[in-house]
Image (cartoon, coloured by chain):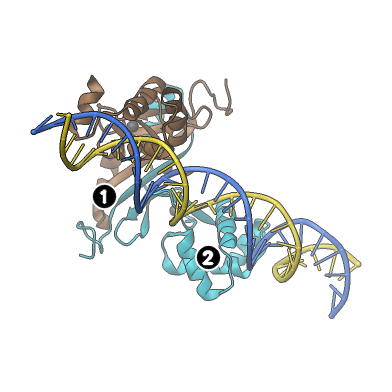
Chain colours: A cyan, B brown, C yellow, D blue
Amino acid sequence: MELENLLKQRGLKVTDQRKAIVKVLKDCNCMLSARDIFDKVKQIIPGVNFSTIYRNLDLMSRKGILCGLMVDTGVSLYGLHREEGHHHHLVCKGCGRSMAIDYCPMSSVEKELAKKGFSPTEHEFIVYGFCGSCGTSGRGE
Amino acid sequence: MELENLLKQRGLKVTDQRKAIVKVLKDCNCMLSARDIFDKVKQIIPGVNFSTIYRNLDLMSRKGILCGLMVDTGVSLYGLHREEGHHHHLVCKGCGRSMAIDYCPMSSVEKELAKKGFSPTEHEFIVYGFCGSCGTSGRGE
DNA sequence: ATTCAGTTGCAAATAATTTGCATTTATAAT
DNA sequence: ATTATAAATGCAAATTATTTGCAACTGAAT
Ligand SMILES: [Mn+2]
Ligand SMILES: [Mn+2]
Ligand SMILES: [Zn+2]
Ligand SMILES: [Zn+2]
């Protein structure tokens, strides 16, 4: 009943497809591409349409329920929005999973930005590499 | 004659289209999208083909002559590779120009990554906002 | 001048994402 | 429960960015 309130609070209707998207992301506990999410949601709602997925990923991200991340290949990954607040991501090139890191570099560049007369609005910090189970070599241990 | 050597050193032929791409980037002194580069190169070589631009942006980036950057809208920007070494970028949402910043956050997260057993390979750090001439409001001063 | 791998132009193919529109549905008001 | 309506969905078509196959061409080496 947690999600239902989240949706209602932001004026969004509680639909099966939205519940399925969130369930998929909760189960996987990682960030997934729109396609991955679509494939998994289909197992729950065989008739879902891809554009419903896209529309909801976008909408729920803008409403702060999900968080999106564009990786360097140009595809976006989506995950549940962490309540714990601002953070960044590690993306494993082996398994594709991502983890959050709490460190944010912004405070360290503030002076450099001010000196250049640049007013920051958003920023990205993403570290690519291999997670513990994928190892340094690029595939399973 | 500077560029010619750069190309030859990496086993790349010196072609008019490569010279034009580099000239366009040198003149603008900023990062441009493939489309912007295509449009400007066309003024020099009316018959260039878009796929030649794409192939060369990719190739010259991989050879370290250019440097590419994927912004959060999913388009890539390209610029001359800075000799000065590793750096990151500010991207102005007003004029689209980007500037380099020397600060790199990697040293600050190394321990956190080690603790998580994550072996980093690449990383991105991009700050979006408004440059001095575009102001805080989003358009020219 | 000859040669040949590397490069280009062109057209067609991908891939990711977006949009228009008719139909359906969640929710609020009878 | 019934109704009303804005929001949400499915479906197909459109966009956008980028990639690829292939035949013709060209830079650089011999
Ligand atoms: Mn996140
Ligand atoms: Mn750069
Ligand atoms: Zn941050
Ligand atoms: Zn760095």
Which of the pair B118/A72 is nearer the observer? Answer: A72
Disc number for residue A22: 2
Q: Residue at x 31, y 56 (%)?
A: A93
Which of the pair A108/B97 is nearer the observer? Answer: B97
Chain where mark 1 sits? B
Relative vertical location of residue A50 with respect to residue A125 in this rendering, above or below? below
**In screen coordinates, is B13 left or right of C15?**
left
Disc number for residue B120: 1
SS assignment at label 2: helix
> Does the CB distance between marks 1 and 2 fall below 8 Å?
no
**Image quadrant where residue A50 sits:** bottom right
Chain where mark 2 sits? A
* Location of residue A29 in the rendering, given as x and y in whole percent from the top left corner: 42, 65
Q: CA distance from mark 1 to mark 2?
A: 29 Å
Q: Quadrant of the N terminus of chain A?
A: bottom right
Q: Is residue B72 visible?
A: no
SS assignment at label 1: strand
Q: Is residue B11 visible?
A: yes
**Image quadrant where residue A51 sits:** bottom right
Q: How many marks?
A: 2
Q: Residue at x 25, y 37 (%)?
A: B63
Relative vertical location of residue B121 with respect to residue B88 in this rendering, above or below? below
Q: Quadrant of the C terminus of chain A?
A: bottom left
Residue type indicated by callout 2: Val
* Location of residue B14 in the rendering, given as x and y in whole percent from the top left corner: 26, 28
Which of the pair B8/C24 is nearer the observer? Answer: B8
Q: Residue at x 40, y 30 (%)?
A: B31
Which of the pair B64/A53 is nearer the observer? Answer: B64
Mark 2 Cα-neighbour bin, 10 Å: few <14, some 14–19, many ≥20: many
**In screen coordinates, is D10 left or right of D21?**
right
* Location of residue A116 in the rendering, given as x and y in whole percent from the top left corner: 42, 22
Q: Image quadrant of ligand 3?
A: top left
